[in-house]
Image (cartoon, rainbow, N blue to C red):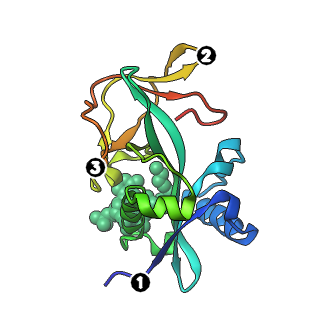
Amino acid sequence: MQKPIQFQVIPAQRLSQADLQSIQDLCTRAYGEDVWCDYEYLKAAYHVVGRDAGVIVSHALWVNRSLSVNCAAPLMTAYVEYVATEPTLQGQGLASQLLRFLLNYIQNQEAIHAELDFAPPYQLAALAPAESQFYERLGWELWQGDLYIRQQGDLIPTPDDDVMIFRLTTTPEISTTDDLSAEWREGELW
Ligand SMILES: CC(C)(COP(=O)(O)OP(=O)(O)OC[C@H]1O[C@@H](n2cnc3c(N)ncnc32)[C@H](O)[C@@H]1OP(=O)(O)O)[C@@H](O)C(=O)NCCC(=O)NCCS
C-alpha cells in the first residue's frame, strides 16, 4: 500500500526558513552530496513538497522558463529541478506521485491563478534528467534534436546536455527531433 502523502505547492518567497532547510537537507541525503545552489532564479521557484506526518519526504521544484522549438514563439515552460525522495522511502512511488501532482497542478489554471497569482497558462514542462528511464515511465520524452541556449541574439549549442519534455493539454504540435532552445540564465543552463 502507498503511503498517504500530502502534496503542497509553496512559492519560494513564502517558504519558511525551516522548510527550506529541510528541503536542502533532503536533497543532500538523496543525491549523496550538497547539490543546493543559491542561484537567483531559485528565488522565483515553486516548490512541491510531499509530507508524511508533517515531515518533507519528497520534493521537486519548478521555475518558469521560455523554451522555443525551431526559434518559434517561446512556450511558457515549467522547468522541473531538484527532484528528490528521502533515501529510506525511495521505491514506494513517492516521486512518481509528486510529479503527477505537479503536472496536474500546472494544468489547473484556477489553482495557479488563486494560489500563485500567476496568469499565463503553462504550455510545456521540461527537465534535465540525471537518468531518463525514471521519467520515461511517467510519460516524459527525451529531446532528440539539438539543444541551444539563447544569449543576446545568439544560439549557443549545448550538445552535452539531455532534456526531457512532458506534453501538457496546452502544448502545441511539436516534434522532439527539432531544435530546442532556452533563455540563458546564471548557473545551470539546462
Ligand atoms: C529518482 C528519485 C527521485 C525517485 O524517487 P522515488 O520516490 O524512489 O521514486 P518512485 O518510488 O516513484 O519510483 C521509483 C522507481 O524508479 C526507479 N528509479 C529510481 N531512480 C532511477 C534512476 N536513476 N534510473 C532509473 N530508474 C530509477 C526505481 O528503480 C523504481 O522502480 P521500481 O518501482 O520498478 O522499483 C529518487 O531515487 C532520488 O531521490 N534519487 C536521488 C536524486 C536524483 O537522482 N534525482 C533525480 C535527478 S534528475
Percent x, y of residue 112: 48, 59
Image side of residue 175 versus residue 64, left or right: left
Q: Which residue is mark 1?
A: 4
Secondary structure at numbered mark 1: loop
Closer to us: mark 2 or mark 1?
Answer: 2
Image side of residue 133 versus residue 77, left or right: left
Secondary structure at numbered mark 2: loop
Q: Quadrant of residue 29?
A: bottom right
Residue 169 appearing in the image: yes
Percent x, y of residue 138: 29, 56
Residue type highlighted by circle 1? Pro
Q: Residue at x 56, y 56 (%)?
A: 31
Dot placed on the residue nearer the N-terminal end, 2 or 1? 1
Report the Cα–Cα distance between label 3 and label 2.
31 Å
Quadrant of the image containing the N terminus = bottom left
Q: Which residue is mark 2?
A: 152
Residue type highlighted by circle 3? Thr
Report the Cα–Cα distance between label 2 and label 1.
47 Å
Packing grade of label 1 (10 A; few <14, some 14-19, many >=20) is few
Indicate if the residue with disc 1 has its beta carbon within 8 Å of ligand 1: no
Front one among 48 and 90: 48
**Looking at the image, residue 36 lies above or below residue 97:** above
**Looking at the image, residue 148 lies above or below residue 64:** above
Mark 3 and mark 2 residues within 8 Å of each other at the beta carbon? no
Dot placed on the residue nearer the N-terminal end, 1 or 3? 1
Closer to us: mark 3 or mark 2?
Answer: 3
Residue type highlighted by circle 2? Gln
Dot placed on the residue nearer the N-terminal end, 3 or 2? 2
